Image: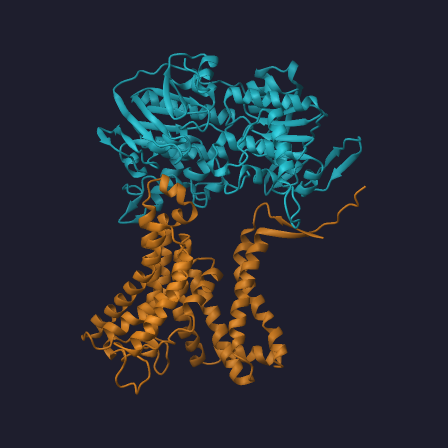
Chain colours: A cyan, B orange
């Protein structure tokens, strides 16, 4: 299959085969062509050349007409996107049934659907509250709904794009076990991931893409991690070595900060947190246990019901985004597209939106375009933000480059406190290693970093101290052992 | 069977060409009702062109007609850039006109250098306040400004009628509901002797340039664009989203208010309840046709004014209904919306393979 976007060849003559009851892992950096390839498979893009062939249960070959998602659905291909495709104002069951029911038939056979779903949930272990509205669910729960949506459609081929990005290790293991069970009954899975450990543990075969080309393919049992990484990035992979920080005085204190549950996910229960200069505090936990409320309080988007925040030598009952910035709190938001950038505005503009008042951005209310351009060129070079240029829209940047843009904006002001909320989610090895390196450098420079992550490996490799969040409460742990941290994440006392 | 497919990357040329193509298409489509009306089509188009470009008088009439449309078009464009849906341009226009006659018809006296700025500021502030209300209701209670600003139009129009029957009524008007005339010192000067074209036109062009400069080159403009494109990110970046909303609302109302001032102080000389044949609403079409660009608004307003003036002339000469103008303007809006659709999607014929 080949797909070109203007001068860019996103997929260049890629051949891929998937056997019945096989798990094929598709590995590659951001922009390697994985999503493009899957979008062609699913009929969302029309290929410039090449075709998709599907063999049905009786072994007959069908060529899928290009550019028709309906044909892919009829061939029982299901795709679970990395970015959710759920209607937030509808219930879980309505989201799952959406598109499976005839439009004009009066009455709905909800009972049969519910029974089928309950059976599916029992069988797969992927449980979601069927009558809750999507907007009430955590990110992890939404992911489960996405997968259930595909399973409900009796898919024969399931494409999972970064499925474990939002799951705990236990949940991820559960998901893999569930899918293994279904694979045993003939389901075929294409599994897109950046997490090498998962790919090695879970797949039967691995195909590696790089710059739109397939650079390698191997049976997992014979695969070797270093060789795979070399195929992916074309050079030896060096993971950032964890070095201990040298903590100094306290730069941020949360004093019994409480948010009643219900307003924003689980709320916060008398959260106590001291952050010192020169340390990275890792907050581990399953998504939906209060991390978003904690991040909201630190970003200035949520007002606590009680408690206080001590930062920049002041004791405050709440932050606003503006107070956070003026008190030296740099924020890397969880959802970089939603909160981090204004996609329709230029890279140069996005680099200054947090400090519009400063003298090198404006003079008497007028933008200093020249100074902004210089600043943007310098920052793009320093932080390796790659794209069509500083005056083009931020929407044209890839996810990794958007994150580098945000890092550049946050770190250039030398904040005393850095909130990094899922800073490497969805990024490839190289980009996430870069993010990690920058966070460590900021710590060594004297910043205190709060790292909220659902990727335990990331916490273990970066954090000087680890706290675990469960049901809105924060517990510190001395342990650096996956299993015992996992216990805390599940709510068992240490 | 046909299918609608999103374009992988919308063409820039196509997006820019859409308003022009839409304008031409709407003019061509006007041939259909013209044919139904039994008019000779080519002669009718010829009369339309002559009606706009045939004489200095015709041309300045078109510019005069475009003047309020530039103001109301800017009012809509500026608000829409911040995703603030100001549908109340019509009401704000009347508020501006009312404030202008209130201070400009003798209540205050002075030289033109004082009176002209005074009526302009009074009308602008009145219009601005007229949009501040709906915007405040939106930021405070989440009330939909489409509904509140639209409904406010009718309230304001009835209020104007009441004022014209009461406190603002000209005792010399022989019973007609109209205001006292604007005094000479407060009237906007004519630009060309014996033509109705007045300084309001230059002010409208100037406001378009000011709006362009503000949106493209100032912090405030950047904030307006940021709030419109992604309010969540604007808030996260520490921008005062509520205050930006309110300031855009005020600025937008100000522009619509100036349309009213320009009409009473530049053209009519006094206020009646039929001052505007829907300039506020047509301004929305102007803004959409312009792709919300302030400079584009000037050209879109000139196009729509040409359609109105040209069709007027044609209907007088050929005896076809002047409602044809409204029809053409409406079709141009539909063409723009359709054009925007075709710029983003393409239509493809597909043949389904016979299912085995």
Q: Tally the numbered discs.
A: 0
Q: Looking at the rendering, in which quadrant would you find the C terminus of chain A? A: top left
> Height in image: B217 above or below A57?
below
Q: Quadrant of the N terminus of chain A?
A: top right
Most extreme residue toward the bottom, as rendered? B174
- Using the image as rendered, state which of residue B339 and residue A173 is in the foreground: A173
Q: Is residue B307 above or below residue A109?
A: below
- Vertical arrangement, residue A303 with respect to residue A282, above or below: below
Which of these two is toward me, A126 or B186?
A126
**Residue B189 visible somewhere in the drawing:** no
Tell me if I can see residue A114 in this picture. Answer: yes
In the image, taking residue A424 as reference, residue A25 lies left or right, namely right
In the figure, residue A354 lies in which quadrant? top left
Locate residue B115, reporting x and y percent: 22, 72
Tell me what residue is drawn at x 60 percent, y 48 percent. Answer: B6
Q: Is residue B279 left or right of residue A303?
A: right
* The one of A109 and A252 positioned closer to us in this rendering: A109
At which x and y percent is residue B134? 35, 57
Q: Residue A473: horizontal and vertical position, in percent?
A: 37, 23
- The image quarter containing residue B155 is bottom left
């Amino acid at each position: 299959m080949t797909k070109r976007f203007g001068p860019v060849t996103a997929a260049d003559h890629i051949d891929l085969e998937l056997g019945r009851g096989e798990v094929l892992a598709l590995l590659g950096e951001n922009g390697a062509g994985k999503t493009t390839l899957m979008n062609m498979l699913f009929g969302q893009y029309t290929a410039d050349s090449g075709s998709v062939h599907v063999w049905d249960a009786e072994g007959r070959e069908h060529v899928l007409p290009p550019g028709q998602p309906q044909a892919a659905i009829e061939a029982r291909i299901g795709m679970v996107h990395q970015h959710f495709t759920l209607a937030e104002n509808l219930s879980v069951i309505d989201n799952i049934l959406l598109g499976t029911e005839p439009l004009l038939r009066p009455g709905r056979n909800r009972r049969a659907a519910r029974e089928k779903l309950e059976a599916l949930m029992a069988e797969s272990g992927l449980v979601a509250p069927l009558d809750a509205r999507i907007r009430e669910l955590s990110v992890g729960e939404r992911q489960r709904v996405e997968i259930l949506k595909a399973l409900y459609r009796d898919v024969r081929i399931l494409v999972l794009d970064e499925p474990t990005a939002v799951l705990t290790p236990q949940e991820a293991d559960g998901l893999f076990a569930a899918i293994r069970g279904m694979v045993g009954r003939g389901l075929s899975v294409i599994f897109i991931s950046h997490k090498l450990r998962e790919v090695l543990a879970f797949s039967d075969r691995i195909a590696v893409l790089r710059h739109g080309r397939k650079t390698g393919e191997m049976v997992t049992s014979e695969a070797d991690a270093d060789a795979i990484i070399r195929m992916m990035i074309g050079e030896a992979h060096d993971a950032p070595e964890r070095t201990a920080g040298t903590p100094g005085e306290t730069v941020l204190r949360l004093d019994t900060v409480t948010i009643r549950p219900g307003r924003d996910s689980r709320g916060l229960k008398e959260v106590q947190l001291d952050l010192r200069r020169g340390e990275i505090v890792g907050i581990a936990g399953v998504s939906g246990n209060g991390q978003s409320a904690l991040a909201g309080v630190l970003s200035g988007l949520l007002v606590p019901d009680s408690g206080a925040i001590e930062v920049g030598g002041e004791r405050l009952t709440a932050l606003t985004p503006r107070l956070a910035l003026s008190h030296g709190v740099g924020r890397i938001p969880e959802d970089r597209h939603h909160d981090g950038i204004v996609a329709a505005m230029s890279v140069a503009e996005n680099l200054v939106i947090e400090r519009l008042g400063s003298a090198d951005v404006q003079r008497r209310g007028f933008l200093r375009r020249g100074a902004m351009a210089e600043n943007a060129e310098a920052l793009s070079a320093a932080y390796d933000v790659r794209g069509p240029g500083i005056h083009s829209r931020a929407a044209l940047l890839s996810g990794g480059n958007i994150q580098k843009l945000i890092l550049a904006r946050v770190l250039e002001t030398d904040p005393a406190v850095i909130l990094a909320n899922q800073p490497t989610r969805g990024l490839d090895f190289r980009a996430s290693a870069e993010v990690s390196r920058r966070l460590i450098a900021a710590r060594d420079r004297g910043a205190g970093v709060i790292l909220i992550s659902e990727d335990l490996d990331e916490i273990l490799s970066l954090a000087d101290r680890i706290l675990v969040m469960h049901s809105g409460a924060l517990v510190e742990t001395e342990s650096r052992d996956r299993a015992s941290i996992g216990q805390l994440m599940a709510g068992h006392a240490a | 069977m046909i299918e609608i497919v999103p374009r992988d990357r919308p063409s820039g040329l196509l997006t820019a060409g859409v308003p022009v193509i839409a304008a031409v298409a709407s003019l061509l489509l006007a041939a259909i009702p013209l044919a139904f009306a039994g008019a000779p089509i080519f002669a009718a188009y010829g009369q339309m062109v002559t009606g706009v470009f045939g004489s200095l008088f015709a041309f300045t009439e078109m510019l005069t007609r475009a003047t309020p449309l530039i103001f109301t078009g800017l009012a809509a464009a500026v608000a829409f850039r911040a995703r603030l849906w100001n549908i109340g341009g019509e009401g704000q226009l009347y508020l501006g006109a009312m404030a202008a006659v209130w201070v400009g018809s003798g209540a205050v006296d002075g030289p033109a250098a004082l009176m002209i700025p005074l009526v302009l500021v009074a009308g602008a502030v009145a219009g601005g306040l007229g949009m501040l209300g709906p915007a405040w209701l939106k930021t405070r209670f989440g009330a939909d400004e489409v509904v509140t600003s639209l409904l406010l139009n009718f309230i304001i129009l009835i209020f104007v009628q009441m004022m014209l029957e009461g406190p603002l009524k000209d005792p010399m008007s022989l019973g007609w509901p109209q205001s006292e005339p604007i005094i000479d010192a407060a009237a906007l000067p004519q630009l060309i002797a014996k033509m109705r074209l007045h300084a309001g036109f230059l002010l409208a062009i100037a406001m378009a340039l000011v709006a362009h400069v503000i949106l493209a080159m100032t912090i405030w403009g950047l904030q307006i664009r940021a709030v419109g494109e992604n309010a969540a990110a604007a808030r996260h970046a520490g921008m005062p989203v509520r205050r930006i909303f309110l300031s855009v609302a005020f600025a937008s109302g100000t522009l619509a208010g100036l349309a009213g001032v320009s009409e009473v102080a530049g053209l009519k000389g006094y206020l009646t309840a039929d001052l505007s044949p829907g300039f506020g609403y047509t301004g929305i079409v102007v803004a959409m046709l312009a792709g919300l660009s302030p400079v584009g608004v000037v050209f879109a307003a000139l196009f729509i004014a040409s359609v109105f003036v040209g069709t007027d002339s044609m209907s007088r000469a050929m005896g076809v209904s002047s409602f044809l103008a409204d029809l053409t303007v409406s079709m141009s809006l539909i063409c723009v919306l359709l054009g925007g659709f075709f710029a983003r999607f393409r239509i493809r014929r597909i043949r389904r393979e016979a299912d085995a």
